[in-house]
Image: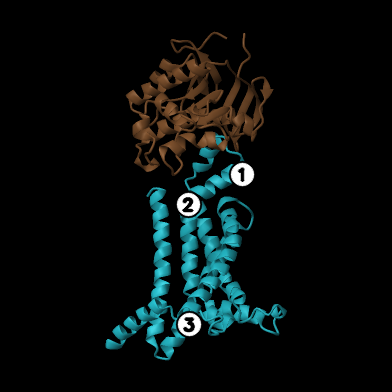
Chain colours: A cyan, B brown
Amino acid sequence: MSYLSDGLSRAVGLLASGDAATFSAVAATLMATSLSMFAALACGLPTGFCLGYFRFPGKRLFRMVSDAFMAFPTVVIGLLVYAMLSRQGPLGDWGLLFTIPGMSIGLALLALPMVVSLTASAVEQMDSRLRLTLLTLGADSRQILLGVLWEARFGVLSGALAAFGRVVSEVGIAMMVGGNIKWHTRTITTAIALETGKGEFAQGIALGIVLLAMALILNAALALLRRRGGP
Amino acid sequence: MSEPVYELDGVEHSFGDRLALRCPWLSVKPGRIVGIRGPNGAGKSTLLMIMAFLMAPTRGVVRFCGQPGRIGDVRLRRQAVLLPQDPALLKRRVEANVLSGLRLRGLSVDGAASEALDLVGLDPARYLRRWWWELSGGESHRVALAARLALKPLVLLLDEPTASLDPESAEMVRQALYAARKRRGLTVVAVSHDRDWLDSVSDDMYRLDPRTGIVQLTQEGHPCEP
């Protein structure tokens, strides 16, 4: 057990000393996660809202596909994005393979179905009387849409947080599309996988602590928002 | 004699093959409190939805202040405000709920929440900062009524306004309606099963039935002579 406690104390040392390799992986993770979540939220929030709010032909099929894609194997997403971005692929000219933007495309595709389905669920679960309430208070069409989205905000945020958790902890896509290049596309998860394989627990534990801290901070922020908004 | 706020002419509404509402005529004069009673399924709530311009009748015309009303017209919806039978509150504090309609319309909210809560008999000092989930069913209903009174509409349409209220609260609602009418000439159309409350509050009383349509009643509850 001593190697674990040694690893933990060295990990704290690495974080305290501002180890460059560790913080490079943290920066790459934050960059890739931010880009992918921005893209997934920009596309997924309006799509999920429309899916939950409006009735249209093919809605159930669309929802079924979106739900099914939440369980899509990440390694397959990685393979598809790799095939698209590789030199022979249709998007090969963009030169995005083994870059953070390229990796973000794969991660965004991973997050998108979660954002869509969980936003749609949050909107569907809204009190059915809400629309009538807004109408009787004199809301116009735009205000009704915004009002429903605002009332569903905690459900939507929870969905976004779940998608963030999936993206930030993803290894397969980051490894295949990012290439795990040190100082460049090495993320927290790919670094942990690599360092653990080499028996270097200290950096793995240090990065694990950062990953846990990020998850805790985001969950605490959501809990705080929920408290401010009632139960 | 002032122009009626509402004139309904040959209004009917069907859900599929089922006739849900038959109201050959109805005239509501400004500043009056009109009570409409009738059995379950008489179409009372449907009538209010049509009068609130939230639903188009299958047949007939609804004139509002002399003009034919149009469904979806936000301007009309803002003058004829409906309090549904089971109103939902927004997931916010009482103050934000009472002011929500005013904010949607971009109107001033200074002092409006306290004034409206006072009208429905809820102490602003105790209730303004409460969350929606801290209220009982009756308190929620009165907050929803306060939110609509704060809008100072031309007409208030009330669907079973005393259904979730104890007798004291029902009396406060009655007083609130009288006060709003006295201060700004509010016109009220209320449908209810609570015959005693309706008798006590209404200037004009009607009975609605899908077979016979709408019939005006005397103060003793008998049909008026045609």
Image position of B74 with respect to B202: above or below: below
Which quadrant does the N terminus of chain A fall into? bottom left
Q: Position of residue B122 (x, y in %)?
A: 37, 29
Whether the residues at callouts 3 and 1 have beta carbons within 8 Å, the answer is no
Q: Residue at x 42, y 33 (%)?
A: B143
Chain for numbered disc 3: A
Of helix, strand and loop, which one carries label 2? loop
- Give the secondary structure at mark 1: helix
Determine which residue is flagged by label 1.
A142
Q: Amino acid at mark 1?
A: Arg
**In front: B202, or A161?**
A161
For residue A125, the mark is 2
Specify the amino acid type for callout 2: Gln
Residue A210, quarter of picture? bottom left
Marks 2 and 3 belong to one chain: yes
Provide residue A77's location: percent of width, then percent of height: 57, 76
